[in-house]
Amino acid sequence: MKALIALEDGKVFGGQAFAGRGEVYGELVFNTSMTGYQEIVTDPSYHGQIVTMTYPLIGNYGVNPEDNESRRIFASALVVHECSRLVSNWRADKSLPEYLEQSGIMGVEGVDTRAVTLQIRERGAMKCVISTEDLDPDSLVEKARQSPGLVGRDLSSEVSIEEAYDWPCEDPQCRLAVLDCGIKTNQLRLFAALGCECRVFPNTTPAEEMQGWNPDGFFVSNGPGDPAGVPQVVEIVKEMIATGIPSFGICFGHQLIALALGGKTYKLKFGHRGANHPVKNLSTGKIEIASHNHGFCVDADSLDPELVEVTHINLNDDTVAGMRHKQLPVSCVQYHPEASPGPSDPFYLFQDFIETVKR
């Protein structure tokens, strides 16, 4: 079925829907990963976004239930050059088209994804609409322009859980209070492997309630949207940090910690989304190859140098990729050390945090 992809700047791309029907809105972004499409679409950080994969062939190893990063697909739609119907992996139990169709998520192929990526790199991530129903380009462009963007929106509360739950550990040596702003399951798996019993709390949970569980550490997860759009969550993070409890944040959690420490954030032109971005550890001088997925960033000039030290930078554009508090046991990174797209260079960050928690 024919599908049109319309951007707010007036650009329109054509393709065919290989899953789903109807009309979908979101911010159009691109991801440069060659693999990991299942983890990408089930990452809650993609809520409100339409993901374009730059690698030309997607879906060849299928889908399996073990590789989901959350309870469902959160990406609004998936755009690829070619979707494979042939599944060549012994772990797979269905194809990507079947998975998207069963989940009610639109997938579009036959798209010049190189042109889409160049458009986003040149003009920035944009509001977008994909439709199999309205095939009038002018109409769709206007719909894209009138759709809500991401700036100022509280998307993390839309993906956060409604009730707290426990993530068990076979040999618990410490307890972590986890604030769910859109958490990826592998973060919990790694904490459990390191001896942490986790209780995952909705992002609306008062700091007093989390403290009442008597945790040894506090973790702020990744999540979607504009960190400046959730001042109520920033206040919760600020109150938890003020207790002196060891705290760690990833991606959206990194941004929330920066805001809680008096910093500011801003929207990147087209974001960082891929599996092989280089990050420099300023303490050791070593370069880490890491997975990224964010459209907002911490403003380095807004950080108080008397309180906060930048620990990592993204070598592609020198943006802040990590920081720590100089007096309190608080650290965070903009990238995803729990993701293992091949390199597992940043895994030490989990180990360092847990060592601090266990002291």
Image (tube, rainbow, N blue to C red):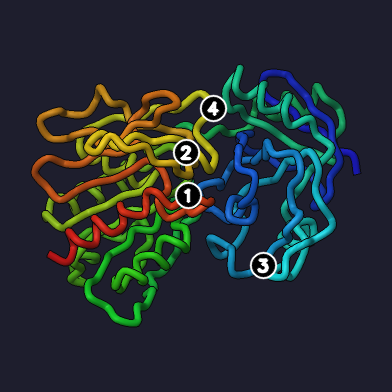
The tag earlier along the polypeptide, 3 or 4, is 3
Residue to which mark 3 is pinned: 64
Callout 4 crowding tier (Cα within 10 Å): few <14, some 14–19, many ≥20? many
Residue to which mark 2 is pinned: 294
Of residues 251 and 64, the one nearer the viewer is 64
Q: Residue at x 39, y 49 (%)?
A: 345
SS at circle 2: strand
Residue to which mark 1 is pinned: 343
Q: Residue at x 29, y 29 (%)?
A: 264
Alpha carbon distance from label 4 to label 2: 9 Å
Tell me if residue 259 can be seen: no
Question: Which picture quadrant has residue 322?
Answer: top left
Question: Which picture quadrant has residue 172?
Answer: bottom left
The tag earlier along the polypeptide, 4 or 2, is 4
SS at circle 1: loop
Left/right of residue 156 with respect to residue 173 in the rendered view: right
Instruction: Residue type at mark 3: give it.
Output: Asn
x then y, percent, for residue 81: 78, 38
Q: Nearer the viewer, mark 1 or mark 3?
A: 1
Q: Nearer the viewer, mark 3 or mark 4?
A: 3
Judge whether 236 appears above or below 168 on screen: above
The tag earlier along the polypeptide, 2 or 1, is 2
Q: Nearer the viewer, mark 2 or mark 1?
A: 1
Judge whether 59 appears above or below 325 on screen: below
Q: Residue at x 25, y 31 (%)?
A: 263
Alpha carbon distance from label 1 to label 3: 22 Å
Residue to which mark 4 is pinned: 270
Left/right of residue 261 with respect to residue 113 in the rendered view: left
CB-based contact (under 8 Å), mark 3 and mark 4: no
Alpha carbon distance from label 2 to label 1: 19 Å
